[in-house]
Image: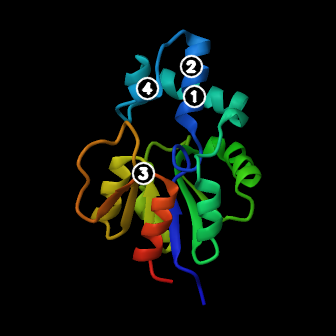
């Protein structure tokens, strides 16, 4: 019998991207950003640079220093536990040009945990897919994410959604979504809300 499918975001859900990137950016470009300063999802605003400059710096960081990114605390154990009962897929809004780097990182830190890795943003296409569309395409019942706009999109499209609490997502959640504070709470929520 097929396991229920759950979609899991990559950056700041399983990979601690923002902590690693801010340390790199502060050192390379003389910024003085702390993790608690990241109070909105638009990181260009946080680093006081335009979007194109941010994208270029983020991609350069990923290509040169991706191994500096650590797994989020508790994610490894939680996802190994969930993978016994659920089919897990990474659904990320990373650009597809980072696919090989991202897949290599996942293979090192989360071997044999995910059944698929799906990139919503295409470098060659301005029309990006939504995470809710990707979730429906793979048959996911729920999305675990840190971005409020993806969680809103998920619940508006009949998916269950879990928001991992971060400094940049402190707005009020829509009905149908739940805020959690660590991976132990994610596991408890999934086991109580996504039947096997």
Q: Which residue, as the protein is rendered here, is positioned at the far bottom?
A: 1
- Please tell me whether mark 4 or mark 3 is closer to you in this view: 3
Q: Position of residue 27 (x, y in %)?
A: 61, 14
Real-space CA distance between mark 4 and mark 2, rounded to the nearest whole angstrom: 15 Å
Q: How many marks?
A: 4
Q: Which residue, as the protein is rendered here, is positioned at the far top?
A: 30
Q: Nearer the viewer, residue 64 or 177?
A: 177
Q: Dot 1: what SS?
A: helix
**166 over 112 or under it: above or below:** above
**183 over 167 or under it: above or below:** below
Real-space CA distance between mark 1 and mark 3, rounded to the nearest whole angstrom: 22 Å
- Are the residues tagged 4 and 2 within 8 Å (C-beta)? no
Asked whether residue 136 appears in the rendered view, the answer is no
Q: Is residue 22 left or right of residue 67?
A: left
**193 over 99 or under it: above or below:** below
Q: Which residue is mark 4?
A: 51
Q: Which residue is mark 3?
A: 181
Q: Which residue is mark 1?
A: 21
């Amino acid at each position: 019998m097929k396991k229920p499918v759950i979609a899991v975001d990559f950056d700041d859900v399983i990979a601690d991207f923002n902590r690693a990137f801010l340390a790199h950016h502060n050192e390379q470009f003389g910024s003085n950003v702390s993790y608690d300063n990241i109070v909105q999802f638009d990181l260009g605003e946080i680093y006081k640079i335009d979007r194109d400059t941010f994208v270029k710096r983020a991609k350069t960081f990923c290509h040169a220093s991706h191994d500096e990114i650590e797994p989020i605390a508790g994610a490894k154990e939680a996802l190994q536990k969930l993978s016994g009962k659920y089919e897990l897929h990474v659904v990320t809004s990373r650009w597809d040009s980072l696919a090989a780097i991202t897949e290599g990182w996942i293979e090192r830190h989360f071997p044999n945990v995910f059944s698929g890795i799906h990139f919503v943003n295409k470098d060659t296409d301005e029309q990006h897919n939504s995470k809710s569309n990707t979730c429906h395409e793979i048959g996911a019942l729920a999305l675990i994410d840190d971005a409020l706009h993806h969680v809103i999109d998920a619940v508006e499209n009949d998916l269950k959604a879990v928001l991992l609490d971060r400094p940049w997502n402190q707005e009020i959640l829509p009905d149908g979504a739940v805020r959690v504070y660590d991976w132990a709470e994610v596991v408890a929520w999934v086991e109580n809300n996504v039947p096997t």
